[in-house]
Image: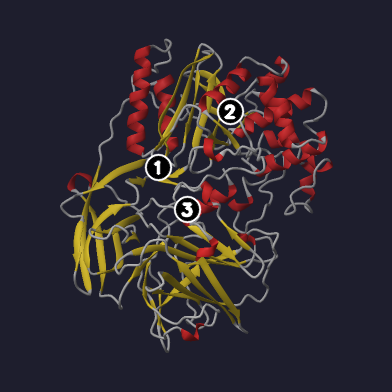
Amino acid sequence: MRPLFKTFFILKVFLLISCTKHDSKNSQMIQSSIAYALPLKNIEIDGDLSDWPDTFEKYAITDTRKKQDSLSPEKSAYFKVGYDENENHLLVAISYPNDSTPIIDEELEWNKQDSYSFYIDEQHMPFGSGVARYSFNEKITQARDPKISWDPKLLSLFDWDKLEKGSKKGIHRTTIELKYELTKPLEVGMAIGMNHTIVDANNTDVFAKFYTWIGSQYGDYTAGRLGTVVVAASKPKLTTLTGSLKWNNNADTIATFPQTIVVKSKTEPTLWATSAVDSLGAFKVRLPHGSYELTMVNDLINMPENYLKYKFDPTTNTVDLDKDMLEHSATIKAAPFKDLLPKTGILNDGLSEGDKVKIDEFIAYYMQYYGIPGVQIAVITNGEVSYSKAFGYANTYTKEPLEINTLMEGASMTKPMFAFAVMRLVEKGIVDLDRPLYKDATPPKDIANNPWAKLITPRMVLYHKTGLPNWAEDTPDGKLFFKFKPGTGIGYSGTAFTFLRRAVEGMTNKSITEIMNEEVIKPLGLQNTYFKDTKEGLAQRTANGHYFKQARIKDIPQDPEMASSVHTNAEAYANFLLAIHRKEGLSRKTYDVMVHPTVRRDEHNEQKNVSKHYYGLGWSLQNSPFFGLSYGHSGSNGDFKCTSIIYEKSNNGFVVMTNGYTGHMLQFHLHNLLNIGTVQVDP
């Protein structure tokens, strides 16, 4: 899994809807998902906020982790917002305490140093339109490349010249003023998406602190994650809506609710807000008077072992806000789920044309139920790719279809490919599986002074026995540490593969790109397989990932990551899997070691008729009472979910790649459809 995207999902994305106020002498500090822009004139963009009226609301900018700030407004971070209708400008004032140990470095990325970021979505379509991010401090001006957005229109909207900025650093506080020229005419009642991030970096290699108005600092990754700024002629009349969700009588045993809902204006398409829902189904949001509809961010609820699809009862999901306080109850209903599994796996007696139709129907239904945007599948029978097809969308926002040759992120399916390259180098006498890595590459700095770092070998990395966590971002303080002494336990680690990559580069005096081309791509004749961006650019050929149904930016790797960066498609990866099955490129003896079920994975219980799971050298293996030994690997970068597997005795298998957060639900059931049928086992 990509480290950054993992962090992105750990920070649960929700919009604060509380109306907590902090009293101050001249104004109020409001923590809300909606701000109101009021008319302004004669504002100089110089960082001096003395020309702003004291009556303008201060909206709190708070710690993304704590999501609270008990300090007084004079010591907290906040922003104000207004507009100049004559010049079609949005005006923003930001104020925050100075950092006593600032890090300002033009060589670092915006999120690794003290900086301010302004996010804006002029179109503000619910969970659709693209987000522009402008990040700067006194030395840098950085922005998200609009070409990798899911929204093509963002390219024409993004322009540094539209943003005039001024700042002033006082003894205790820094103030910033922004003047942003809108593309569309300002009109009272319209709404604009906006967010702010203040970065407080440090020199201790732990996570930087991020302060935002709404959600996380990565609000430009996916649509619908900004706050809402409503253009108003004067301070509007507001209703505090206190609501509750109830299950219909047929689902009264369900003890959970959606995490968020959307409250959307029935008359102004850009006016909508997201409200968090608590464990009892309660929500609260403060909105201008008007008619609204309750709808969902997505129509799935994450259950302990599954997802439950639901919908609103249309007789209870509308509400008129016409008073200061209002209570409303809405009913939601669970959608039925159809079990399409046959009694036995359809690959047991080959793959007929009728079986292909069953696969099509199966995938179509699971895509619809679980909200999976796009699916690629390649089915292997009798040692050949006998069926290959693509379904759905590469980008749900533009409705660009997913094709067979569209590139997808393979995530951790990179690991077996790198393992194959390593074993080729072992046969050539270049890599010794038991030579400590520190002799060819400096250990990661977090563990460089730990004597255990000198124990790690290539064999330990490929068997996941290094003791290192998956990524530093998985740890409480953002630092690597040893969970156990290398060689004494089992623990999945992507960062260990990064260490091995650097050691292999040191052993060969070649880049990892050269190594993968020489040891994997060329000898196996693989097509449509890349580990980093190319001169021609991969963005135009790669699908967008999706968080549920919401498209997100294309995160094209600029540097090969041997734990997670392969970009390929299902048929191309199936050809790699078949090459391994045919034992190409390596001696049979080496294959017997690489894909031998050597290390038992302790996260699976040993029960009768349940597959036993193992690690080979860079591979996942399983031994099942139903279909015997199989090997392959799964992958998850969060917004891409995929898996690959081939069965040793039957010469059957499959590769499925999805560009959605819930794609793993299809993968699990495809395994049963193709090989097991209604006998349910953990695949």
Identify the residue position indicated by label 2 in the image.
528
The x and y percentages for residue 637 are 53, 42
Tell me: residue 492, above or below residue 450: above
Which colour style is shown?
secondary structure
Three-letter amino acid code at the position of disc 2: Asn
Instruction: Please rate how many residues cluster around mark 1, counting C-alpha atoms within 10 Å: few if below 14, some from 14 to 19, many from 20.
Output: few
Of callouts 3 and 1, the N-terminal one: 3
Identify the residue position indicated by label 3 in the image.
156
Of callouts 3 and 2, the N-terminal one: 3
The x and y percentages for residue 51 are 47, 85
In space, the residues marked 3 and 2 are separated at their CA atoms by 31 Å
Which residue is located at x 73 percent, y 29 percent? 422
Instruction: Please rate how many residues cluster around mark 3, counting C-alpha atoms within 10 Å: few if below 14, some from 14 to 19, many from 20.
Output: few
The numbered mark at residue 398 is 1
The x and y percentages for residue 546 are 44, 44
Residue at the extreme front of the image, as rendered: 86
Secondary structure of the residue carrying tag 3 is helix
Which quarter of the rendering shows the N terminus? Answer: top right
Three-letter amino acid code at the position of disc 1: Thr
Secondary structure of the residue carrying tag 1 is loop
In space, the residues marked 3 and 1 are separated at their CA atoms by 16 Å
The x and y percentages for residue 57 are 39, 79
